[in-house]
Amino acid sequence: MIHDVLQALRQRTHQILITTHWNPDGDAIGSALGWAHYLRASGHQVRVVLPNAPSKPIQSSPGYSSAFVTVAEERPDEAAEVFRRAELHFALDYNTPSRVGSALEPMVREFAGRQVLVDHHQQPDGLFVDAYSNTAKGSTSEMIADLITADDGWGNVDVACAENLLMGMITDTGSFRFPSTTAHTMATAARLIEVGAQPHAIHTRLFDANPLSRLHTFGHGLQSAELLAGGRAAILSLGSSDLESAGYVAGDSEGLVNWGLSVDGVEVSVLLREDAAGLVKMSFRSTGDRDVNEFARTHYSGGGHRNAAGGASSLGLAQLKEELTQKLSEWLA
Ligand SMILES: [Mn+2]
């Protein structure tokens, strides 16, 4: 089926649209820009529409500032025009149209052309008849590299394409340490490095470019860590007063939840972050077979992957902590 799409692409030049999810992370941007660079090098007309802007460091990704990238939140009319003109839409790194945010969702649902999903999240939406979905893959960027291999197109992979794909692989595999990292992952990364992608430059750009507020946010979050369920789970929390005193800006708590797993014996880590409206955003991480996707789905109308998921609750922070303590203790007993 995906070979169908590749074959159609080889027959003639297409007007292609690429989208990815709200709050695009390294893999969302890496797969979208990587695929865009590749398709452009292959002769297609390509536009990328992002629901909103990624974090500052990710905005330095090669091609992000190009004329072929539209941030819909900033230029809604231009985004709508791109949707009208495109004949083929690649939906990357998300499994259901609601993930693109309320402004773009109807455009994805009503898109008149062919839609192709490329994604590694669980339970892909039936809207996408052409779906290349593989939940065993560590990143959508690795899947894009596989498409390039299937297209026999590595000759069209330039440094900008390679940098983006390697960034996506690095960010979604926790720098190649999550269980989804395979020999194939490493062989793909090696190939991207051969083309000219530089892992150290990607790390410096993404991970050594923090504002001070991020350190202070981590300070509050780490200080709050508590163990429960007999030491099998950790909860970290950031109340609105913590965020205020840290000078929190969006993105500052990214990665904080992983520190819960660094404690000996902890299998599940949860980060709770209160937003201005009192809603608590939840991030879950786990090791091995502990399925936080299912836990978040069942209890907190969330989801994600087996080892990384999100959710939300309108219970207050203190009450939510109590509830979580009970639910996690039952689950992990
Ligand atoms: Mn991803």
Image (tube, helix red, strand yellow):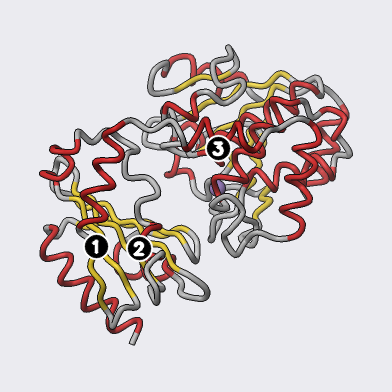
> Residue at position x 75%, y 23% from top?
14
Query: Where is 207 relative to 228, above or below?
Result: above
Residue identified by numbered label 1:
225
Q: Earlier in the sequence, mark 1 or mark 3?
A: 3
Q: Nearer the viewer, residue 22 or 190?
A: 190
User: Which percent across, then down, holds residue 9?
Assistant: 81, 31
Reply above or below: 53 against 304.
Answer: above
Mark 3 CB within 8 Å of ligand 1? no
Check whether the beta carbons of the residues at disc 1 and disc 2 lie within 8 A of each other.
yes
Question: 159 or 133: nearer the eye?
Answer: 159
Residue placed under numbered mark 2 in the picture? 260
Q: Residues within 10 Å of mark 2 (few under 14, many from 20)?
A: many
Image x and y of residue 302, in percent: 36, 59
User: What is the secondary structure assignment of the residue under circle 2?
Assistant: helix
Q: Secondary structure at mark 3?
A: helix
Image side of residue 155 versus residue 127, left or right: right
